[in-house]
């Protein structure tokens, strides 16, 4: 790898001030001082003469854009962990490395998932809206009845860092842990979270009360949770999704919520962000959040620091530590 004293870096979105300042010290930065993602044409023009691209999860880095990149572009240093918005095969074909930022938002994402696990069965969003409406008539023995979480079974799809962190939190609330994963975890990890493994997702769905989605989005997980699997979760089941909206068949989920096929859902992600289906907005049995599971000051700064480290190590002629390898998803 060639050594670059001051690589030219295109950053697609505004980052925390301290991160942007540090990048300007180290690199020749072309920042896009905007809150919305740039158009594909504008982005293509900017990366025609760049060494590094720093995109976010809302930037579609597809084969067309990668093919249009100039010969200097040799690193896509993603600001975030998920890379389903990047065509990894197209990047490999152009000999462009891709890095991400694993581990920096584990606790924040797990905290948000746990908040939704509590909020949905206990109807916190409905209760808050009732108080704000001015129509609350006071305490009553049958008012705002929800479901107890202690003693319930939580199924986790995707038992990586975040899934394991959710399991540890849920155990503290007396929730039994079940999980489905591409590969079974080592016994010592299973024991640490007292988790039961299910090789078949369908088998797990019939046993659990709550489902937390924490796997990457890729071809094999697209619409992994469809109408049939929602029915397996059952009328007293709850779905929590802080991963990617496309993992769930959203129209099927809406129908399941409307028809009482499942009891409720907590969603931090949606199929067509930032657009949210108005039918979801009108449903009382769903808690909706604006993709904010990782939205802490600490996580945003730690993500930026990992991006900087990946660029610096690559510019020094070494393999970046967080390179996304083939088969990552």
Image (cartoon, grey):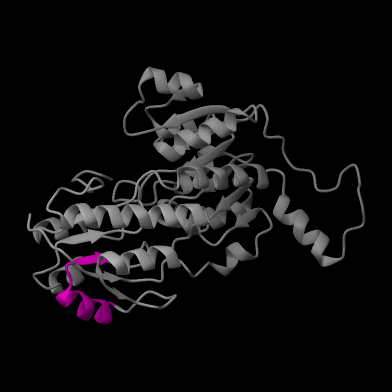
Foreground pick, 134 / 28: 28
| Quadrant for the N terminus in the image | bottom left
Residue 69 vertical position relative to residue 170 in the rendered view, above or below: below
- Residue 247 painted magenta: no
Residue 265 vertical position relative to residue 11 in the rendered view, above or below: above
Residue extent of the magenta highlight: 40-54
Give coordinates of residue 251: x percent, y percent. 49, 59
Foreground pick, 127 / 313: 313
Give coordinates of residue 226: x percent, y percent. 44, 48
Q: Residue at x 43, y 64 (%)?
A: 18
Q: Indicate left or right for 316 with 242 as reference.
A: left
Residue 122 vertical position relative to residue 252 in the rendered view, above or below: above
Give coordinates of residue 217: x percent, y percent. 35, 51
Give coordinates of residue 231: x percent, y percent. 53, 42
Q: Residue at x 53, y 67 (%)?
A: 277
- Residue 87 lies in quadrant: bottom left
Q: Is residue 114 visible?
A: yes
Foreground pick, 290 / 14: 14
Q: Residue at x 31, y 60 (%)?
A: 85
Q: Residue at x 87, y 63 (%)?
A: 135
Q: Main secondary structure of the magenta part?
A: helix
- Residue 134 lies in quadrant: bottom right
| Quadrant for the C terminus in the image | top left
- Residue 52 painted magenta: yes
Residue 198 vertical position relative to residue 322 in the rendered view, above or below: above
Q: Indicate left or right for 33 with 145 as reference.
A: left
Q: Indicate left or right for 197 with 211 as reference.
A: left
């Amino acid at each position: 790898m060639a050594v670059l004293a001051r690589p030219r870096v295109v950053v697609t979105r505004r980052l925390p001030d301290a991160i942007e300042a540090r990048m300007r010290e180290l690199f020749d930065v072309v920042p896009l001082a905007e809150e919305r993602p740039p158009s594909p044409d504008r982005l293509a023009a900017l990366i025609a003469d760049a060494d590094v691209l720093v995109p976010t999860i809302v930037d579609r880095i597809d084969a067309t854009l990668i093919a249009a990149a100039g010969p200097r572009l040799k690193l896509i240093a993603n600001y975030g962990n998920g890379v389903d918005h990047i065509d990894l095969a197209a990047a490999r074909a152009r000999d462009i490395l891709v890095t991400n930022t694993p581990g920096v938002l584990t606790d924040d994402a797990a905290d948000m998932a746990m908040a939704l696990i509590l909020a949905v069965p206990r109807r916190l969003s409905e209760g808050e809206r009732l108080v704000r409406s001015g129509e609350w008539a006071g305490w009553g023995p049958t008012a705002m009845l929800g479901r107890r979480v202690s003693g319930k079974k939580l199924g986790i799809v995707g038992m990586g860092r975040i899934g394991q962190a959710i399991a540890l939190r849920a155990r503290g609330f007396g929730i039994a842990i079940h999980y489905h994963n591409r590969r079974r975890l080592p016994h010592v990890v299973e024991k640490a979270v007292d988790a039961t493994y299910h090789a078949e997702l369908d088998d797990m769905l019939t046993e659990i009360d709550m489902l937390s989605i924490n796997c990457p989005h890729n071809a094999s997980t697209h619409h992994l949770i469809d109408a049939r699997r929602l029915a397996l979760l059952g009328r007293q089941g709850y779905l929590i999704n802080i991963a990617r909206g496309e993992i769930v068949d959203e129209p099927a989920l809406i129908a399941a919520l409307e028809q009482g096929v499942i009891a409720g859902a907590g969603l931090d992600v949606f199929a067509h962000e930032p657009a949210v289906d108005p039918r979801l907005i009108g449903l009382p049995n769903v808690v909706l959040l604006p993709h904010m599971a990782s939205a802490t000051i600490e996580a945003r700064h730690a993500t930026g620091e990992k991006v900087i480290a990946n660029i610096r190590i690559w510019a020094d002629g070494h393999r970046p530590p967080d390179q996304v390898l083939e088969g990552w998803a």
